[in-house]
Each structure stands twice: as structure tokens, then as C-alpha cells.
Image (cartoon, rainbow, N blue to C red):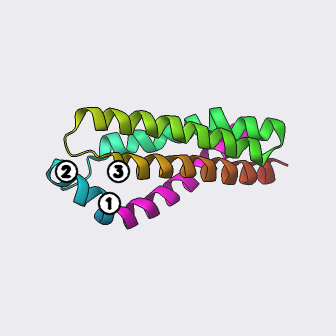
Amino acid sequence: MTYLFAYLSTLVIFLICDMAWLGTMASRLYRPTLGDILLTDVNLSPAVAFYLVYPAGLVIFAVLPGLKSESLAQAALSGALFGFFSYLTYDLTNQATLRNWTSQLSLFDVTWGTLLGAISAVAACWVTARLTA
């Protein structure tokens, strides 16, 4: 049950936080920078795949180590590093291949990914520890 609670809590927290970010920043940051290369409607299949798979990575690399060590600091550090390296890979690849992708966009997005990883891992670790105690 620990794995199920860890995954579901990570998924819910990650989704809520990222939807808040995207709802706030899409029109302020992404659309003005990326312009015509953005789709008018979200392609749901890859979006759903991402939101189902990415939290599993956070569970494996951040939440479970935090639970094992009984340390929210461990979960925060591991989640931040997972977010940093994941988002950095995505952003630098886009910056290398897309004409509209800017260093400023990469900086904001990687910062968000780092923070999102830490927040999601800490919150999920805390929730899971309480539910499985």
C-alpha cells in the first residue's frame, strides 16, 4: 500500500501544482515566447502519458528515499534534483532545436521544474508517511 499511496499522492500534488503554474504562466510566459509553434489545443495523449509517468519517477527517486530515511529534507533534495535534471534536459533540448525557445524561458521553466519536484516529493512523502503509519 505504501507504493500506491506514494504514487497517488505524488500524482495529485504534482497535477494540482503544475495546473496552477500552467494556468497562470501559459499566457504570460509560454505563449508570448513560443507564439505560433504552440498548438491551439493540447494534444491529450502525450500530456496524459507525461502526467502518469513523471510522478512515478518522483516516487522512485525522491519520495521512497525520503520515506526510507524518514527525512523530508532527503525527499526535497532528491525531488529538486530529479526536477532540475528532467526539466533541464527538456529545456536545453528545446533551446537547441526550436527557434523561439529562449534562455529566459529555459531559466524560468527549469526553476519551476526544480521547485515542483521538491514540493511534490515533500508533500507526497509527508502524506504517505501519515497514511501508512
User: Which mark, residue 105?
Assistant: 3
Q: Which residues are magenta?
A: 1-25
* Residue 131 drawn above or below residue 45: below
Residue 66, by quadrant, is top right
User: Which mark, residue 29?
Assistant: 1
* Residue 35 drawn above or below residue 68: below
- The residue to which callout 2 is attached is 39
User: Mark 1 or mark 2, which is nearer the start of the sequence?
Assistant: 1
Depth-wise, is mark 2 or mark 1 nearer the camera? 1
111 and 50: which is toward the camera: 111
Question: Where residue 88 sits in the image (x, y, percent)?
Answer: 44, 37
User: Which mark, residue 109?
Assistant: none
122 and 44: which is toward the camera: 122
User: Mark 3 or mark 1, which is nearer the start of the sequence?
Assistant: 1
Badge 1 local density, few (<14 within 10 Å), some, or many (20+)? some
Q: Amino acid at mark 1?
A: Leu
Question: Where residue 80 sits in the image (x, y, percent)?
Answer: 60, 43
Horizontal arrangement in the rendering, residue 73 relative to residue 108 (left or right) = right
